[in-house]
Amino acid sequence: MKALILSGGQGLRLRPLTDDKPKPLVALNGKPIAEWQIDWLRKSVKLDEVVFLCGYKWQRLKQHFGNDYHGVRVEYSVEDTPLGTGGAIKKGLKHLGVTEGNVIVTNGDILTALPLKRMVSAHDNSDARPAATLLVVPYRSRFGVIRIDKEKIVRKFEEKPDFPDVWINGGIYVINSSKVIGHLPDKGDIERETFPVLAKDGGVLSYPFKGFWALIDSIKDLHEAEKQVKARRSL
């Protein structure tokens, strides 16, 4: 199986860690985020090739990984100007030369213990024959929540609660190349321009997951993820 890793952002909220390198090379517990991701992919599926969809400081990625990582071929689809997630994926599929079959797509700032093999199986075996299956995770508030009653009396404080009935995009997709590529923009985001169109005809399947999932978008996110990964000892 082949995978695309979206790696084009500048990681502004992770500065100064991203002043001289792209976000996937930021270390988490001494190991670059991208290595955590590829190791997770290798454990989950029979991984043949990974393509970084990159732009900002992409040469540092190539210096670090070269063209092989533990037997997995590594390639680079470089954007001269930002193409958005949809444009980057379209360019990446063309770089792979893939016109049919499944491809894994993941944002380059996600760490998770998602059982990816099960997600791929759900995609393949769905009666809906989806064009894409996307990971969805429970919405977790970044703020504490105050519960009040009808008399406006405060009854409860909840520190950053989960909302189990509210789901958000988890940033990991299984896509059927032949069904998706015609809906991808040359420049634009898959979340805004592709998935909404496919969803109108029932072409997008969700894969709900309530286990470990972390978005590394800021220094605070990084420190929280380090604690969680250390407690788990692995992904």
Image (cartoon, rainbow, N blue to C red):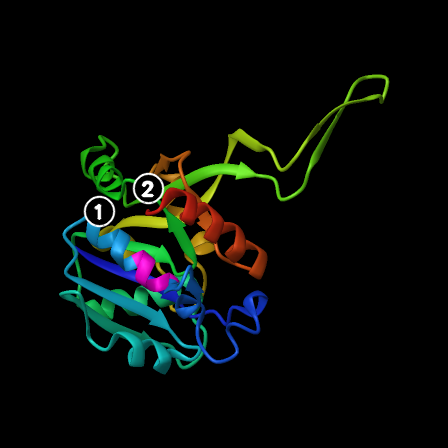
In terms of image quadrants, where is residue 26? Answer: bottom left
Amino acid under label 2?
A: Leu
- Kindly check if marks 2 and 1 are in contact, taking CB atoms under 8 A apart as contact: yes
Find disc 2 in the rendering and name its residue.
114
168 or 199, nearer to the observer: 168
Find disc 1 in the rendering and name its residue.
44
SS at mark 1 in the image:
helix
Magenta region, mostly helix, strand or loop?
A: helix
Q: Residue at x 36, y 50 (%)?
A: 172
- 1 vs 224, left or right, is left
In terms of image quadrants, where is residue 124? Answer: top left
SS at mark 2 in the image:
loop
Residue 34 colored magenta? Answer: yes
12 or 173, nearer to the observer: 12
As drawn, 178 above or below 72: above
- 155 vs 230, left or right, is right
The span shown in magenta is 33-37
Residue 52 at x, y percent in the picture: 31, 69
Q: Residue at x 25, y 53 (%)?
A: 41
